C-alpha cells in the first residue's frame, strides 16, 4: 500500500482537501450537548482525527477546514496541523451556509488549485483518494464522487448512474428501508465548479449538483468501511464498527 500511495501522490502533488465541519449537529445534541459533531469521540479519538489521519497517510498535506458551530474547539484541537506534518487553514462561517455555501466561502483558499478534494466531516469511507482523483481526470469530470452501497438507504438520498459511471440523477430521501447507492461523502471538484456555487447559504445536493449533471458528474463505487455519525443511532453503531475495524487491522498486521 505504501508504494501505491507514494506513486499516486506524485500524480497529484499539492491537491488540497476541504473538510466540511461546520454543521450544527442538531441530531447529536442529546449525546453531545457541548461538543461539535466532528469532535465526537469514536474509537477513542475525535472523529475528525480519523479523517485527518487518513488524508495524511495518503500524502495529502494541505487541509482547509470549513468550520462554523463551536469552531473554536476544532481550531484548538488541530491548530495549524504541524502535529500531523501538514498544513491546516480555516474558513469560519459566521452564519450557517450549508455544504455548498461553506465551500464558496473558502474559495479564496483554493485559488491555486486545479482540483480539490471535499470530505463530509461526519462520515468516514475507507478508500484510496488518489484512485478517485485518477478516475476524475480520466473521465474529464467536473465533479466525481465516491459512492457506497448500503443495506438501508432510508435516511439518505440515492445516486443513479449509467453503465459508464456517469451520474444521471439524484433521488431524494424516501424513508424506505431498502438497499441503495449513496454518496460516501468524498468528492473531487474541478476548480471551475466553484463558479456554479452561489454566494450565501446553499446545499451541494439541492442547489449545485443538479445543475452540474450536464457538465459531467461521475461516480466510482467503493466497498471499504463506511462510518456515519449523523444520528445517535449511527453514532452508537460507529463505535462498534470502528472497534471491529481496529481489531481486523491489528490482526492483519501480525
Image (tube, rainbow, N blue to C red):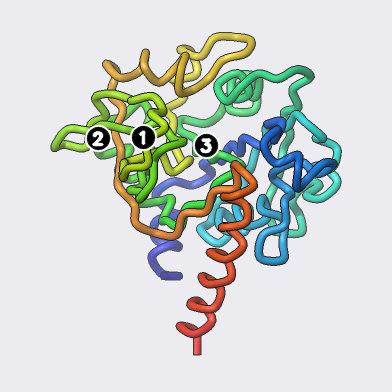
- Whether the residues at callouts 1 and 2 have beta carbons within 8 Å, the answer is yes
Residue at figure coordinates x 51%, y 58% from the top left = 58
Q: Name the residue under label 3.
A: 118
Residue at figure coordinates x 50%, y 18% from the top left = 194
Q: In this view, does 157 lie to the left or right of 36?
A: left
Query: Where residue 85 appears, x then y in whole percent?
Result: 69, 58
Q: Which residue lies furthest to the top in this view?
A: 199
Residue at figure coordinates x 54%, y 44% from the top left = 14
Q: Residues within 10 Å of mark 3 (few under 14, many from 20)?
A: many
The N terminus - image quarter: bottom left
Give the mark nearest the N terminus, 3 or 2: 3
User: Can you tell which mark lies on residue 144?
Assistant: 1
Out of 182 and 185, give the one closest to the viewer. 182
Give the mark nearest the N terminus, 1 or 2: 2
Q: How crowded is mark 1: few (under 14 residues within 10 Å), some or many (20 or more)?
A: many
Mark-to-mark CA distance, 3 and 2: 18 Å
User: Can you tell which mark lies on residue 187?
Assistant: none
Q: Name the residue under label 2.
A: 139
Query: Where residue 237 appears, x then y in whole percent?
Result: 56, 58
Query: Foreground mark, 1 or 2?
Result: 1
Mark-to-mark CA distance, 1 and 3: 10 Å
The correct choice, above or below, for 58 with respect to 228 in the image is below
Q: Residues within 10 Å of mark 2 (few under 14, many from 20)?
A: some
Q: Residue furthest bottom?
A: 254
- Helix, strand or loop at label 2? It is helix
Query: Where residue 129 appears, x then y in whole percent?
Result: 43, 50
Amino acid at each position: 500500500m505504501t508504494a501505491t500511495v507514494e506513486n499516486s501522490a506524485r500524480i497529484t502533488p499539492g491537491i488540497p482537501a476541504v473538510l466540511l465541519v461546520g454543521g450544527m449537529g442538531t441530531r447529536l445534541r442529546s449525546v453531545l450537548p457541548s461538543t461539535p459533531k466532528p469532535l465526537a469521540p469514536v474509537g477513542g479519538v475525535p472523529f475528525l482525527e480519523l479523517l485527518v489521519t487518513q488524508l495524511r497517510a495518503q500524502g495529502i498535506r494541505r487541509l482547509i477546514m470549513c468550520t462554523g458551530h463551536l469552531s473554536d474547539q476544532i481550531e484548538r484541537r488541530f491548530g495549524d496541523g504541524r502535529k500531523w506534518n501538514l498544513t491546516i487553514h480555516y474558513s469560519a462561517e459566521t452564519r450557517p451556509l450549508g455544504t455548498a455555501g461553506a465551500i464558496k466561502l473558502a474559495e479564496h483558499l483554493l485559488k491555486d488549485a486545479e482540483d480539490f478534494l471535499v470530505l463530509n466531516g461526519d462520515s468516514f469511507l475507507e478508500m484510496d483518494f488518489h484512485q478517485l482523483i485518477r478516475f476524475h481526470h480520466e473521465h474529464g469530470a467536473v465533479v466525481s464522487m465516491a459512492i457506497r452501497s448500503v443495506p438501508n438507504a432510508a435516511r439518505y438520498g440515492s445516486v443513479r448512474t449509467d453503465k459508464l459511471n456517469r451520474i444521471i440523477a439524484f433521488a431524494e430521501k424516501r424513508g424506505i428501508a431498502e438497499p441503495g447507492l449513496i454518496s460516501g461523502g468524498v468528492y473531487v471538484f474541478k476548480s471551475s465548479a466553484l463558479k456554479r456555487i452561489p454566494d450565501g447559504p446553499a446545499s451541494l445536493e439541492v442547489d449545485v449538483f443538479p445543475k452540474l449533471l450536464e457538465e459531467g458528474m461521475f461516480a466510482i463505487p467503493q466497498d471499504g468501511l463506511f462510518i456515519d455519525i449523523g444520528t445517535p443511532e449511527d453514532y452508537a453503531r460507529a463505535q462498534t464498527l470502528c472497534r471491529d475495524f481496529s481489531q481486523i487491522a491489528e490482526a492483519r498486521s501480525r
